[in-house]
Amino acid sequence: MGPAIKILVIALSLALDVFAVSVGVGIRGVPRAVKMRIGIAFASAEIAMNLIGAGLGAVVGHYLGEVAGYIGFGALVLLGCFMIYESRREAEAKTPIDMSKGWGLFVAALSISLDSLGIGFSILYIGVPVIESLAVIGAVSVAATVLGLTLGRALGRRAEEGAELWAGIVLLLTGVAFILLKLTGHG
């Protein structure tokens, strides 16, 4: 798998989670300025967590060597499983908070960027350029946010729940694929 495809898979798997949250906010309808504020907050959180994860991955990699990559990939698998579990649990009991400003926006940006921490941790071990990856992740995150906010009213709550489930499935499969590629010497 080439670096461009790896970057695209990572960006899209992260974008599904951002899309899901954005649809939830969009269901209530938001003005254009709020869409931009949320898009910037979500993209910034995604990039920041990728950088933190990459920093942690570099430190751990220094001490553990090749094993660190497998730890990062395993973290993606676990995170994907957790997201699948949470999507099913949250489908039954969601408490709406205002994610368009203040504390609600901060909590939403932080919660959707936790998967980026795992991606950031493993990004050093999948053979992709970090700066280009972050740029693509940021752009796709903003696009997914704006699309989710825009389509939120039309798609409704069901699309939000489905996107969160698919984000977990994609992250799980991404982690497994990266482990297999690394084991076979292709990653």
Image: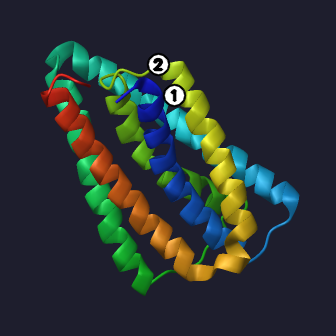
Q: From the top left corner, tell me how far across and down residue 178 is, in percent.
A: 26, 36
Q: In this view, does 92 lie to the left or right of 98?
A: left
* SS for dot 1: helix
Could you tell me if residue 27 is visible in this image?
no
* Discs 2, 1 touching: Cβ within 8 Å: yes
Q: Is residue 147 left or right of residue 187?
A: right
Quarter holding residue 44: top right
Amino acid at dot 1: Ser
Q: Is residue 19 left or right of residue 174?
A: right
Identify the residue under disc 2. 129
Identify the residue under disc 1. 133
Q: Is residue 24 left or right of residue 167?
A: right
Amino acid at dot 2: Pro
Going 86% across and 55% down the picture, which residue do you hit?
33
Q: How crowded is mark 1: few (under 14 residues within 10 Å), some or many (20 or more)?
A: many
* SS for dot 2: loop
